Image: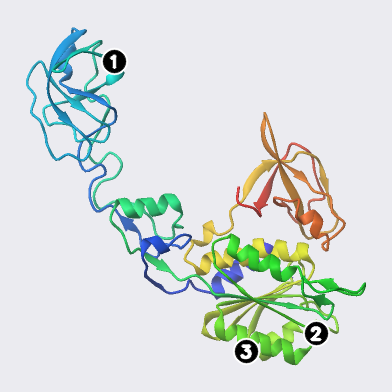
């Protein structure tokens, strides 16, 4: 068995990000940049007013209250640049270019209008006040978004602002899910006491879509070597990642490891020193395909997905390896005690109080307890060799939900 961190390093050294191509920015939500996005000009491109008010010469207001003559108007979007001399000002609006003779903007709240062409400024103003200087946010040619950035709403707005309408982004992996087990029935099918409804298929399909990776395909096969091999070969033809649940241990009906090798896969690890999820497997196949074998119990599936599968999806999509497996460091709301020498992943729920956010362990009856899994926000990670952590100590917490 390998430690979880070694398992992750093995995955990163065994796969490479998918190819990149330009893509319309309006269709790039949740894609990762293959090249940085640069500012095509200074932002802002000129000195701009940060307020509605009056563009003035600060020296004219040293003895305020002072009455100035209004000699023009500068609305946002206007190319006009009214000139102003001593004792004059220009009515200006938020986002408008500041006239070249002005060196401050007085908020309208700090003035009293006397006539249409006069305004009284009630107090002095500092030089440069309420002016956004040219290039204050970014200079032309600087990196506005680095390579590896995920294009969320704010990042797409930056692309639009700098005129990058076709950013260079990595492809996202196509994903197939294969659930295995003679006991599995479709969610809508009647079930006997010896059968269960297949929840892992819906879980993984939804988890893939929830994280912005589109629609995964899903098939369920019985514990039949030929059927599993056929499903796996078809998935490898049409997908970049194949997720198999069940059949990955060492029992009589654990057919996945042999099927993976027969389909041309190379197994890089089979067994991780962790609980739940110890028997899980990672393999690669021709054409840069990768395969994950996850134990059939749903908490093992949830843990394996968030520890290894989702980070690999991100890595293949162009996310930097160091950003693929982010952790929160949070205080424990109550003590945890574990047994064994493996890494333990305990269900945890975020609790919010006046003192801040903490994580509370969620009781469960074992790795088949999907109901408990539905109450969790993620996993508390207890390192190997640690048997107890007192309340108040900070722990690593892997989020399973978008926070």
Q: How far from the left and from the top, in percent, is residue 126?
A: 24, 19
Which of the pair 34/117 is nearer the observer?
Answer: 117
Q: Nearer the viewer, mark 1 or mark 3?
A: 1
Q: In front: mark 2 or mark 3?
A: 2
* 3D distance between C-alphas at marks 1 and 2: 78 Å
**Distance in Å between CA atoms under marks 2 and 3:** 20 Å
What SS does tag 3 mark? loop
Q: Mark number for residue 223?
A: 2
Q: Nearer the viewer, residue 332 or 162?
A: 162
Q: Earlier in the sequence, mark 1 or mark 3?
A: 1
Answer whether labels 2 and 3 touch (C-beta < 8 Å): no
Location of residue 15 in the rendering, given as x and y in whole percent from the top left corner: 53, 74
Q: Tag on residue 110?
A: 1
Question: In the rendering, which numbered label is found on residue 74?
Answer: none
Could you say which disc has been placed on residue 264 in the image? 3
Name the outermost residue toward the right.
Answer: 193
> Where the N terminus falls, by quadrant?
bottom right
Tell which circle, 2 or 3, labels the residue nearer the N-terminal end.
2
Q: Residues within 10 Å of mark 2 (few under 14, many from 20)?
A: many
Relative placement, left or right, of 45 versus 154 is left
Instruction: Judge whether 328 appears above or below 166 on screen.
Output: above
In this view, the mark in front (1 or 2): 1
Tag 2 secondary structure:
loop
Where does residue 340 sit, x and y in percent of width and height? 84, 58
Image location (x, y in percent) of residue 220: 73, 79
Q: Is residue 57 left or right of residue 215?
A: left
Residue occupying the point 83% across, 83% down: 253
Task: State whether residue 186 appears in this view.
Answer: yes
């Amino acid at each position: 068995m390998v430690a979880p961190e070694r398992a992750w390093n093995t995955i990163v050294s065994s796969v490479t990000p998918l190819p990149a191509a330009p893509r319309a920015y309006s269709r790039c939500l949740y894609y990762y940049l293959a090249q940085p996005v640069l500012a095509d000009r200074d932002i802002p491109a000129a000195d701009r007013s940060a307020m509605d008010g009056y563009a003035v010469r600060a020296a004219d207001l040293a003895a305020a209250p002072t009455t100035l003559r209004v000699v023009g108007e500068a609305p946002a979007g206007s190319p006009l640049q009214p000139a102003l001399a001593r004792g004059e000002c220009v009515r200006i609006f938020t986002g408008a270019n500041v006239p070249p003779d002005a060196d401050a903007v007085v908020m309208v709240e700090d003035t009293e209008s006397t006539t249409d062409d006069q305004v009284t400024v009630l107090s002095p103003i500092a030089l440069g006040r309420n002016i956004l200087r040219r290039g204050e946010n970014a200079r032309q040619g600087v990196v506005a978004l680095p390579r590896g950035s995920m294009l969320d709403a704010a990042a797409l707005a930056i692309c639009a602002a700098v005129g990058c309408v076709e950013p260079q982004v990595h492809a996202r992996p196509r994903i197939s899910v294969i659930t295995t087990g003679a006991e599995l029935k479709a969610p809508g099918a009647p079930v006997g006491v010896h059968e269960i409804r297949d929840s892992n298929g819906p879980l993984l399909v939804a988890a893939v879509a929830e994280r912005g990776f589109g629609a995964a395909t899903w098939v369920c096969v019985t514990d039949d070597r030929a059927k599993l091999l056929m499903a796996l070969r078809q998935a490898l033809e049409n997908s970049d990642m194949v997720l198999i649940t069940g059949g990955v241990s060492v029992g009589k009906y654990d057919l996945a490891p042999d099927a993976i090798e027969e389909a041309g896969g190379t197994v890089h690890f089979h067994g991780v020193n962790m609980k739940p999820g110890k028997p899980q497997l990672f393999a690669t196949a021709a054409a840069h395909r990768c395969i994950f074998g996850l134990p059939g119990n749903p908490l093992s599936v949830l843990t394996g997905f968030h520890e290894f599968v989702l980070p690999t999806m991100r890595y293949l999509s162009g996310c930097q390896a160091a950003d693929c497996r982010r952790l929160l460091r949070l205080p424990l709301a109550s003590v945890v005690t574990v047994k064994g020498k493996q890494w333990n992943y305990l269900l945890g729920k975020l609790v919010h109080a006046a003192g801040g956010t903490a994580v509370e362990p969620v009781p469960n009856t074992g790795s088949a307890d999907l109901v408990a899994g539905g109450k969790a926000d993620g996993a508390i990670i207890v390192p190997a060799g640690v048997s107890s952590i007192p309340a108040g100590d900070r722990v690593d917490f892997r989020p399973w939900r978008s926070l």
